Image (tube, grey):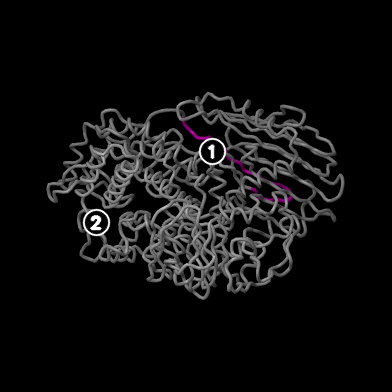
Amino acid sequence: MSTASALLRNQTANNATRPRRSPFAVGRFAVWAGWSPIVRFPLVLFWPVCVLLAATAPASEAPPGANLLWYEQPAEKWVEALPVGNGRLGAMVFGGVPTERIQFNEDTLWTGRPHRYHRPGAVEVLPELRRLLAEGKQSAAERLAMDRFMSDPLRQKAYQPFGDLWIDFVGHDRPQSYRRCLDLDAGEARVEYKHDDVTYARQLLASYPAQAIVLRLSADRRGCLSFRARLTSPHSSATARVVEPNQLAIAGQVEDDGLRFEARLQIRLQDGRIDFDGAEAKIVGATEAVLILAAHTSFKNYQDISADPGERCRATLQATTGADFETIRSAHQRDHRRLFRRVAIDLVSTAAAALPTNRRIKAQAEADDPALAALYLQFARYLLIASSRPGSQPANLQGIWNESLKPAWDSKWTVNINTQMNYWPAETANLAECHEPLFDLIDDCVATGRETAAAHYGARGWVLHHNTDLWRGTAPINNSNHGIWVTGGAWLALHMWDHYQFGGNREFLARRAYPVLKEASLFFTDFLVLDPATNRLISTPSNSPENGGLVAGPTMDHQIIRSLFGATAAAAEILDIDAEFAAKLNAMKDRIAPNRIGRHGQLQEWLEDKDDPRNQHRHVSHLWGLFPGQEITPDRPELFRAARQSLVFRGDGGTGWSKAWKVNLWAHLREGERAHAMLSDLIAKSTLPNMFDTHPPFQIDGNFGGASGIVEMLLQSRPGRIEILPALPKAWPTGRIAGLRARGGFEIDIAWQNGALQRAVIRPTRDGPCEVAHGGMVKRLEMQAGRTIVLDGTLNAAAENARD
């Protein structure tokens, strides 16, 4: 168990309204003698239901509200509402008065039904596509591909909203002392206001243990809580009804022969009464009410939608029988904090930290707010916990939150950067379990991807192009000028290899990761062809994601395939299997067209030296080898400089996720100031009032990518090497972070002051050698599992070294 988790979990699960000590006040950082406390700005007193805090923060404690988003008014727009989630269920809490809207989602509610996307016989035109591209006839190749090579149907399906819970508080038109907040540490949204000298409070959470959304409404004067509650859905088939004396339900079907859905709302009162007006519940004279929302669909798996959503709702509510709100809440907080409290971060607070969150975001453009960057990291970790838990679907383009029947890009899984970016912080930011839903999706796509590999390429193994959906489509979609991109599955497979590198679970490698890696590699042993002009193996037909049309030999493909072959061969060696196949992969890897430097000093995006320095496309695909890949490092200075030149040409603009990728790229170029400038711009210009990232519109990948960038500025790793503070910006002269993870099986804490490393604590989980680097210094250490290493600012061992 993480020490950060241990020290933070000293607080009981039901103490969220007690004054909270900083995670840095005791435990992990207490051994760091000589640490000078960070000067913090005194913060205003928050309202009691959100957090009880002293009006000023002691210098030894983190600033009040360090893990809190808060606002002085209800949300007027969906992008101002606050998200909660348990992986499967998500809700957006508006905090409205006199009408509250809680819009909710369930992660398996999609358009469509089980079906295949591959086009039988597509392989017949593959040789002609390759010939046309080799002869420079791109337009002809794209036309042929549109006619005979694309998926059937051409487009995939869309993630759907489920419904809305509406709560009307009649007469509450002029609330006073209004506050709403999202407590990241408690995993809870809260609202408080006064009306007629009565204080009304709401607490809402999405419980993973209970698999339900739970809301407590209360008044501080007996019998003063009265409201109306109803369920609606944007789906025209939906009908609402009363199912039990204290339950409402709404049910429907997305489309004919498609997914069925049902939600049930159970209302529990301590006093007062419930009346029904049609399908609306009227609560009168209560002091407290607990509303439990269960929501399910008929989805069993991508081939079976025969489940009974109503029975699932009944079972979910039945499982909560006998548990009051505090019992449900305590179980939820224990579960949530077990993950969230693994990482703690403390950066210098400024006056901006006293502002409501929406105003802090706006103020970032005028003056840097380091503590807002810390909040940004923790908010992203919160979002990953809320949108990706074992047994759920993986986080899609909007995580788990969507109010539109026609969301942007269908809110599915775009795997030419966006889905992968969602999971960049999963390992480094100590949320490895949240990676599991992605592995489940990969397993499904291996099965459907075998059919696509055979039908489109006459190849063994499996392939996934640039998108997939609930039905696990793997064929090329939308348009031949960007849909035919063959390395989406290969990139995803490398996430499984990364999971092994961080955790070292040999059983996971043997049982789950290696079969996926092997079949992905097998596909490319059949797919790669020899380019007669260069005598190198190339990927054709393909695309440099969404840029330049259908081509032969994009750089990104070759970087990913080399990495895939290398990972598969390394895994085979660890498992002592498939030696002949591993040798073949290593030999083929060396024959793939290499990274090339073009006439402008840039890293070429394609085989041909045709990059336009004025092209500021949002994708920086050919820099995959710099990050998240590990091909381009300072050890290869010519390529390193060329990658930098390409990044300079791309500029500092772009969509939210594009800026987030550039934060990581500049961090890996060891340029902390450029990385910080991109992060500041991401927060100031591409962040919505509720801290969601905007493409525009809302797209969650930038949240995760930005969080990853913060981590990569502070810690980087590759097999056998850890780099501490590789891109520390001047804007963060003093700070601390605890609980980060590094490849090789390490958990690491770092403290720095006035731009200089003070302490690094390394907790190995495996034996073996490792280099630790910082500021041009390199220390070679022999690590022992369970033996903590404490290094000072010159990487010398400190006296605190001891076995855990």
Q: In the rendered image of this protein, does residue 56 appear above or below residue 309?
A: below
The reply to whether the magenta stretch includes residue 104 is yes
Alpha-carbon neighbours of circle 1 within 10 Å: few (<14), some, or many (≥20)?
many
Mark 1 lies on a secondary structure that is loop
For residue 652, say whether it is visible: no
As drawn, the label of residue 234 is none
Q: In the figure, is residue 527 to the left or right of 723?
A: left
Instruction: Check disc 1 and report the residue beneath it.
Output: 107
Indicate the position of residue 524 as horizontal and vertical percent values: 26, 40
Indicate the position of residue 266 as horizontal and vertical percent values: 72, 34
As drawn, the label of residue 595 is 2
The quadrant holding residue 609 is bottom left
Q: Amino acid under label 1?
A: Asp
- Disc 2 and disc 1 in contact, CB within 8 angstroms: no
Q: In the figure, is residue 737 to the left or right of 561?
A: right
Read off the magenta span. 93-112
Indicate the position of residue 626 as horizontal and vertical percent values: 34, 58
Residue drawn at the location 28% of the way across and 30% of the way down: 455
- Closer to the eye: label 2 or 1: 2
Alpha-carbon neighbours of circle 2 within 10 Å: few (<14), some, or many (≥20)?
many
Residue drawn at the location 56% of the way across and 56% of the way down: 343
Label 2 – label 1 distance at C-alpha:
40 Å
The reply to whether the magenta stretch includes residue 730 is no
Q: In the rendered image of this protein, does residue 548 appear above or below residue 345?
A: above
Query: For this rendering, which residue is in front, 664 or 564?
Result: 564
User: What residue occupies the far right of the structure in this picture?
Assistant: 222
For residue 725, say whether it is visible: yes
Mark 2 lies on a secondary structure that is loop
Indicate the position of residue 740 as horizontal and vertical percent values: 50, 57
Q: Amino acid under label 2?
A: Asn
